[in-house]
């Protein structure tokens, strides 16, 4: 029978809560989920962490593999790196106060991503400008920011992997710098740091995996925003001016700005750059449809394209606590209040750019190897057989068999991994035939 | 005898909503067979250009694939008006597309040149007021998969 991957990487299934509605089976973009036997939901191909199954599950049977923070005093320094998506979750609180609240909650240091987000935006601008001359990457260059989108490309559109900008992520650059900075503080020699990343993204829930397998592990633990939301809300009521002042003197502090606030929104990555021919696409179906377009040669006049598999970008991530549209409204309000000016000089960017600082060093081949499908390719004979079965089934992609669609089911039957008995269309035809036979006999 | 697989996908005249589904179908089929991703991409580009040509200029038609272990043949057939001057049609930038299509971003006159560039070989036959056939061959023997 079909090989079951025992530990689905980014999500976990609660067999007791599963009602076998097969919504997740149908929506999974890598067709990796199956319903097998009685009440058994499982993963049979690679999970890219997009979190669509979490989103569509009505009973909460699919959960992300995140870390429940127990900030006990273990003698380590707890350092939180904060995704800017967090700020939009608290409509009437300023970003600085959200960070103060986290400190009150028990994190020893809190770090905002603004600085490295700006750096990456400027470096991306530089890359695009140079690419106009060198054409090192074919247009459109695809943003490397959304890990689920990058893995989706490796899985379903490997021919487009060389369009992906080979840059590191802001959280990687930030955590590398923070570790170094921390080591040089007075505290650094006494306590071991533990880096947490507080995020709305289900695609980064396994820190060992890095942030898109393009780069090494950079933080130690991932915390979903939804997991700390109510606790943090409690602490926010207790923070005052004193807490804010204390935070401003923290050696690891960097003030959040407009760029980082906008980062979580669709278009947010491009908003801070001077790339003219760019576009932003958010949502899983939309991302797939645009990747199809690029694959047939369209959009070659676009220079940079930003994909987010979550609707409304990272603000619509599966690990958020507040509805994406509410969060979006709050984020826009806050962004208007903060400065959008550039803080980093071009000289500094160019220096780092030339030294290779931004480059991840993982090419298309490695990505393809890590995230290509684990299915065996079909032979010509198998495809002929699949087509024959599809005609015979003549189904409606109902997924009652436990596979996401008729074609996948037929492929698995041909590979000996599923049985035709599981098709309710064939069963129904059989029953009708039998009843007809009985009626004829009576006549 | 070597096994050969054949399948054809219908294309409808002026149906811009469904346009692209045939080439996407072929593309996904080839991916499931583990065909080199660069070859798949070249076939996808050719299939799509052919499909759009049929939707815009041709009448109803079909996109078909025929494959064996070492060769893939993609053929676009339509019962449209035919091409008057094939040599001229192969020129970059030459187009007879109506203004409405140009406004939709099509009709840049790159369709046939693009197909010629991406296929290993191409044969165009056309009979005025009757039909146009564009047959493109892709070798699977060259492991590199790059454009020629």
Image (cartoon, coloured by chain):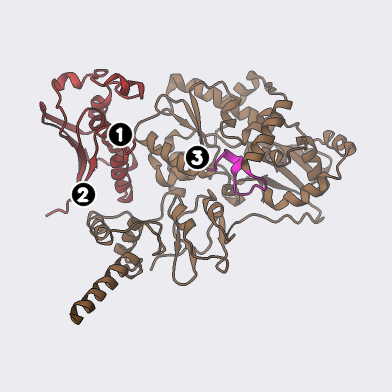
Chain colours: A brown, B red
What segment carries the magenta color?
A310-323
Which class describes the residues within 10 Å of circle 3: few (<14), some (14-19), or many (20+)? some
C-alpha separation, residue under disc 1 versus residue under disc 2: 21 Å
Q: Secondary structure at mark 2?
A: loop
Nearer the observer, disc 1 or disc 3?
1
Judged by its main secondary structure, the magenta piece is: loop
Q: Earlier in the sequence, mark 1 or mark 2?
A: 1
Parent chain of label 3:
A
Q: Which residue is mark 3?
A: A362
Q: Which residue is mark 1?
A: B45
Question: How far across and how far down the image is residue A165, in percent?
Answer: 50, 33
Please state, as top left, top right, bottom left or bottom right, where the C terminus of chain B lies in the image. top left
Which class describes the residues within 10 Å of circle 1: few (<14), some (14-19), or many (20+)? many
Q: Are marks 1 and 2 in contact (CB under 8 Å)?
A: no
Which class describes the residues within 10 Å of circle 2: few (<14), some (14-19), or many (20+)? some
Residue B71 seen in render: no
Q: Are marks 1 and 2 on the same chain?
A: yes
Residue at horizontal 69 percent and vertical 35 percent from the top: A330
Q: Which residue is nearer to you in this view: A363 or A259? A: A259
Q: Which residue is mark 2?
A: B69
């Amino acid at each position: 029978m079909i090989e079951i991957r025992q530990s689905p990487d980014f999500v976990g299934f609660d067999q007791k809560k599963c009602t076998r509605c097969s919504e997740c089976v149908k929506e999974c973009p890598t067709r990796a989920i199956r319903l097998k036997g009685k009440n058994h939901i499982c993963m049979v191909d690679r999970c890219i962490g997009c979190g669509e199954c979490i989103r569509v599950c009505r009973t909460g049977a699919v959960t992300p593999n995140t870390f429940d923070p127990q900030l006990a005093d273990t003698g380590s320094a707890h350092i939180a790196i904060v995704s800017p998506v967090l700020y939009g979750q608290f409509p009437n609180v300023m970003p600085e106060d959200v960070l103060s609240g986290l400190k009150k909650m028990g994190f020893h240091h809190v770090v905002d991503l603004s600085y490295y987000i700006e750096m990456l935006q400027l470096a991306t601008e530089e890359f695009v400008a140079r690419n106009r001359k060198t054409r090192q990457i074919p247009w459109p260059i695809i943003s490397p920011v959304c890990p689920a989108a990058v893995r989706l490309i490796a899985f379903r559109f490997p021919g487009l992997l060389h369009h992906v900008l080979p840059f590191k992520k802001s959280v990687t650059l930030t955590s590398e710098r923070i570790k170094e900075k921390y080591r040089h503080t007075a505290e650094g020699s006494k306590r071991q740091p533990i880096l947490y990343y507080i995020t709305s993204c289900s695609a980064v829930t396994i820190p060992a995996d890095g942030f898109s397998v393009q780069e090494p592990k950079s933080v130690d633990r991932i915390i979903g925003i939804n997991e700390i939301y109510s606790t943090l809300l409690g602490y926010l009521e207790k923070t005052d001016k004193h807490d804010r002042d204390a935070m401003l003197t923290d050696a690891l502090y960097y003030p959040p700005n407009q760029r980082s606030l906008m980062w979580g929104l669709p278009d947010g990555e491009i908003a801070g750059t001077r790339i003219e021919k760019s576009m932003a696409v958010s949502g899983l179906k939309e991302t797939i449809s645009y990747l199809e377009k690029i694959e047939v040669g369209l959009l070659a006049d676009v220079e940079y394209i930003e994909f987010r598999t979550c609707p409304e970008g990272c603000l619509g991530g599966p690990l958020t606590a507040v509805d994406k549209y509410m969060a979006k409204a709050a984020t826009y309000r806050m962004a208007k209040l903060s400065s959008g000016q550039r803080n980093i000089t071009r000289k500094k960017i160019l220096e780092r750019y030339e030294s290779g600082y931004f480059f991840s060093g993982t090419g298309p081949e490695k990505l393809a190897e890590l995230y290509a499908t684990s299915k065996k390719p079909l032979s010509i004979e198998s495809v002929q057989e699949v087509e024959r079965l599809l005609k015979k089934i003549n189904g409606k992609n109902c997924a009652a068999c436990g596979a996401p669609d008729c074609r996948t089911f037929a492929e698995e039957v041909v590979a000996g991994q599923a049985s035709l008995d599981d098709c309710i269309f064939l069963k129904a035809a059989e029953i009708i035939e039998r009843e007809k036979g009985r009626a004829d006999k009576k006549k | 005898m070597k096994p050969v697989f054949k399948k054809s996908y219908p294309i409808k005249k002026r149906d811009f909503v469904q346009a692209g589904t045939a080439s996407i179908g072929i593309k996904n089929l080839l991916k499931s067979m583990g065909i080199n991703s660069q070859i798949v991409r070249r076939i996808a580009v050719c299939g799509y250009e052919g499909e759009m040509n049929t939707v815009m200029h041709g009448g109803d038609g079909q996109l078909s694939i025929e494959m064996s272990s070492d060769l893939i043949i993609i053929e676009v057939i339509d019962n449209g008006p035919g091409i008057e001057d094939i040599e001229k049609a192969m020129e970059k930038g030459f187009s007879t597309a109506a203004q409405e299509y140009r406004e939709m971003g099509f009709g840049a006159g790159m369709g046939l040149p693009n197909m010629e560039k991406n296929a290993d070989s191409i044969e165009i036959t056309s009979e005025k007021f009757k039909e146009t056939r564009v047959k493109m061959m892709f070798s699977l023997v060259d492991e590199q998969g790059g454009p020629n």
